[in-house]
């Protein structure tokens, strides 16, 4: 009888300092203790549904100036009603607080590291590594599914797309394919992650996949903007994944004919100068076509920037600032729809 009583109650869910009982929301922090550099407290919102179900983790702000993704999760956390939710949402809306506060794109200014490259992290590394370790232990290892949110950073112009990984694990890849189609963005980049190599870059989704957790990444917003269209795409996409996972009631119409994109070519600046884009995101460009041009500081054109391949502009530099080695854009080659 006692056992039956216990099983009738769902347990509290605690992540960091946030504890949510069934049917409750709780705010708190995932602490990152001080080490070779400063401590950090990563905000976390735990929403435990009134009914049981899976745990879905939503993580944004590894790049703290990709604002649309951060604001989308802030709004989503406010709008979800735990009484109609099955399962638990663990929302980390702003992983890289220092980047956000100091308006520094791409990296954590505390240690200069990209906060989406060092998973699973290290308990005794620099702040980025310790934060990644805290997310691994508190979020990745505990969740059943994970979505990582990005967008065009301050200097990047892009539309909206998602990433689906072809890991070779048919079971995992089938689940993530369902998630990415339910999310609904109509440009999907196919990743072929391969085995993790020591010292190589490991994103949160790649690490999650490597430990068997279905994980996708989505991108919307650009250049510091928080346009309603981008927020809505991220919020509605997330709700659709929750319906797909039976965490919310309702049916999902998956995106029917997305553009599947295979190999991505990075175009980099080979000298300092001033950049002028000539194409917009999602434009189709032919190999050799100019996607922009570069002038010197006197306004004289130095050279055109040709596309290395024929494909779709995934993102294009949004700012005139251009120094040697900077990325100017990504061009994605069209791919066949992967077989389910
Ligand atoms: Zn990002």
Image (cartoon, grey):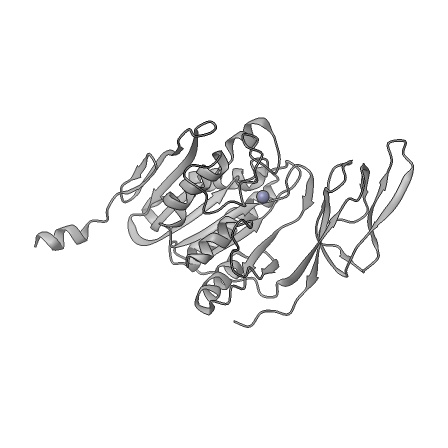
Point out the residue furthest to the bottom here: 339
Nearer to us in this view, 61 or 328: 328
Which quadrant: the N terminus? bottom left
Q: Is residue 160 visible?
A: yes
Task: List x then y, in percent, for residue 327.
Answer: 71, 45
Q: Would you identify the image quadrant in which residue 27 lies?
A: top left
Q: Is residue 331 left or right of residue 48?
A: right
Point out the residue furthest to the front here: 198
Nearer to us in this view, 326 or 242: 326
How many numbered dots are placed on residues in this image? 0
Point out the residue furthest to the right here: 300
Nearer to us in this view, 39 or 277: 39
Task: List x then y, in percent, for residue 324.
Answer: 76, 40
Task: List x then y, in percent, for residue 176.
Answer: 48, 61
Task: List x then y, in percent, for residue 43.
Answer: 42, 34
Q: Is residue 111 left or right of residue 324?
A: left
- Residue at point 50% right, 52% down? 205
Residue 253 higher or lower than 32, as above or below: below
- Residue at point 51% right, 52% down? 198
Residue 302 higher or lower than 237, as above or below: above
Nearer to us in this view, 30 or 114: 114
Give the quarter the ligand 1 occupies: top right
Residue 255 higher or lower than 146, as above or below: below
- Residue at point 38% right, 46% down? 89
Q: Is residue 85 visible?
A: no
Q: Would you identify the image quadrant in which residue 189 lies?
A: bottom right
Point out the residue furthest to the left here: 1
- Residue at point 77% right, 60% down? 309
């Amino acid at each position: 009888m006692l056992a039956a009583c216990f099983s009738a109650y769902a347990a509290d869910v605690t992540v960091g300092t946030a504890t949510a009982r069934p049917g409750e929301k709780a705010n708190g922090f995932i602490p990152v203790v001080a080490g070779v550099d400063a401590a950090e407290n990563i905000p976390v919102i735990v929403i435990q549904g009134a009914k049981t179900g899976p745990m879905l983790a939503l993580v944004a702000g590894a790049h703290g100036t990709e604002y649309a993704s951060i604001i989308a999760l802030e709004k989503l956390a406010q709008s979800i009603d735990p009484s109609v939710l099955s399962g638990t949402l663990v929302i980390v809306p702003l992983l890289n607080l220092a980047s956000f506060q100091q308006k520094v794109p791409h990296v954590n200014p505390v240690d200069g590291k990209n906060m989406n490259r060092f998973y699973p992290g290290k308990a005794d590394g620099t702040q980025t590594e310790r934060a990644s370790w805290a997310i691994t232990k508190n979020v990745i290892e505990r969740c059943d599914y994970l979505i990582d949110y990005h967008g065009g950073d301050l200097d990047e112009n892009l539309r909206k797309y998602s990433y689906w990984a072809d890991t070779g694990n048919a079971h995992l890849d089938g689940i993530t394919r369902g998630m990415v189609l339910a999310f609904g963005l109509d440009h999907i980049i196919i990743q072929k992650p391969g085995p993790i190599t020591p010292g190589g870059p490991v994103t949160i989704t790649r690490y999650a996949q490597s430990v068997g957790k279905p994980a996708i990444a989505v991108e919307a917003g650009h250049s510091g903007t928080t346009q309603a269209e981008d927020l809505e795409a991220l919020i509605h996409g997330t709700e659709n994944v929750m319906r797909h996972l039976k965490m919310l009631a309702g049916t999902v119409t998956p995106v029917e004919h997305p553009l599947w994109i295979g190999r991505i070519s990075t175009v980099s600046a080979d000298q300092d100068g001033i950049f002028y884009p000539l194409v917009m995101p999602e434009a189709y460009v032919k190999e050799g076509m100019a996607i922009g041009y570069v002038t010197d500081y006197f306004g004289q054109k130095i050279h055109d920037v040709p596309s290395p391949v024929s494909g779709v502009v995934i993102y294009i530099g949004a700012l005139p600032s251009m120094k040697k080695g900077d990325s100017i854009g990504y061009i994605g080659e069209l791919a066949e729809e992967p077989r389910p």
